[in-house]
Amino acid sequence: MLVDEITDIQRLRKINAALISRVERAMDQQGNAFSLFQTAINLEGRVRSRTEELRSTMRRLEESNIDLFAAKEAAELANLSKTRFLAAASHDVLQPLNAAHLSVSALSDLQTTEEGRRLVGQVERSLTTIGNLLQTLLDISKLDAGVVMPEIAEIPLDQLFSSIKSDFQPIAEQKGLKFRFRASNAIVRSDRTMLHRLLQNIVSNSVRYTRAGGVFVGARRREGKVRIEIADTGCGIPQEHRDAVFEEFHRGPGAVESDISGAGLGLGLSIVRRMADALGHRIGFSSVVGRGTVFWLEVPAIATRPPVIVEIAAESKRPRGYGLFGTRVLLIENDPGVAEAMMALLQRWQCAVRPAASSDEAIRALGDTDWVPDVIIADQHLEGGDLGSQTIAEVRAYLKRDVPALIITGDGSSDLAHAARASGIELMRKPVKPAQLRALLAHLLA
């Protein structure tokens, strides 16, 4: 039908509306396709941008990982250097201090005037303070470096208490304090050296902060553990100081100094916390200002054993008292200063001494078969890389007898302690206190 032939206006309008609708739909479809095209382009741009950001982030992470790995290697090397330094410091730093201790002790025997004895005593106390400070700093460094590993063993508390009492009884008496211990037959599991040092530091702290009254040390069983308590009648710890008690260089306001106990730098309880953590022992305290403080330490306990009765022979091959007169000593020490000081001290005790600096020299010193040592005193690190523990074994093999032996060293390694214990060798740490050395020698020769 031609347009000229359409006479129905209404019908014409319908046809027009249909055509317009069809055109509009076609335009909408084209518009939607264009919109989708634009959206796709935008998304592609965003993906490309995010991908580039991700790649940049990955590159930064890789660079950070490289830096962290380098820092980790540097830290490990620094820690290794620190460990080596500590091993060297234990020997080299304490070596001259040990020689000074021995020389001053020998010098004290030569004093004939009160003024001379007073000055020697003052030097001895100063050397003791320096030695304690150095040993404390070395201990803190070793604990922080993780080079100290506890050697857990069974420890009778009565022996430990007896040793601590002998250490602090003179100090307490000088200050006019009562110093009491409650006997205990308990046996605990801990590292002997670390537990002894830990309790020493607490007792020293209690004595230092007590003006009048006294210090009491006791123990009681508690749920499979032994709770060791050190109570004093000192000034107490104020509330504002309690959180910092175990921190380095913290000192309370009421310390009482003495010439024997020393001023203290606030390191004792810091060592206590580190050792307790290393041993896995719980530690704590309670305190009342003006009345005193109670420190407690919980240590694993084992069943109490009955006392072992040892029969002593009526006759001994060589009866000997606590004196050292005539004792033959093989001294194996490579440091000339320490060797000279030790020989002077032993000769003042009327001992007959033969020195050596290495294993070969020690064997040569025994070439005279008529001279057999009663005791061997050796340093651990000797001339030519020799070790005292091995030298003692060679000397014993040469003499075909287990001569009593003592290693005096600044080496605090657990390997040495284990080897010495396995070989029946006593171990003493530098710097040596002459009175303790003499007591130990008398014990070995008894």
Image (cartoon, rainbow, N blue to C red):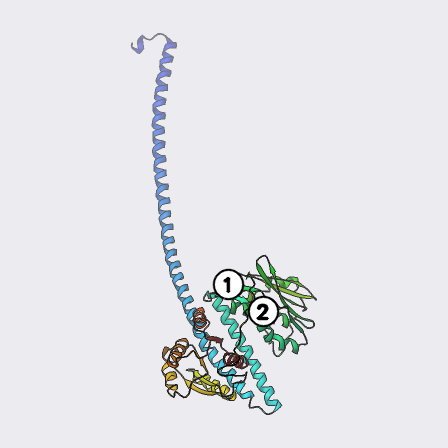
The residue depicted at 62 percent of the width and 76 percent of the height is 169
Label 1 element class: helix
Residue 203 lies in quadrant = bottom right
Q: In which quarter of the image is the N terminus?
A: top left
Depth check, front residue: 299 or 385: 299
Residue 322 appears left or right of 235: left
Depth check, front residue: 158 or 32: 158
Depth check, front residue: 346 or 396: 396
- The image shows residue 5 at horizontal and vertical percentages of 31, 8
- The image shows residue 277 at horizontal and vertical percentages of 52, 62
Query: In this figure, which residue is indicated by the disc labeled 2?
Result: 158
CA gap, disc 2 and disc 1: 23 Å
Q: Is residue 217 visible?
A: yes
Can you tell which of label 2 and label 1 is closer to the viewer? 2
Above or below: residue 334 compared with residue 268: below
The residue depicted at 61 percent of the width and 75 percent of the height is 168
Disc 1 residue type? Ala
Label 2 element class: helix
Contact check, label 2 and label 1, Cβ < 8 Å: no
Quick one: which residue is furthest to the left in this view?
2
Query: In this figure, which residue is indicated by the disc labeled 1?
Result: 278
Disc 2 residue type? Asp
Above or below: residue 294 compared with residue 440: above
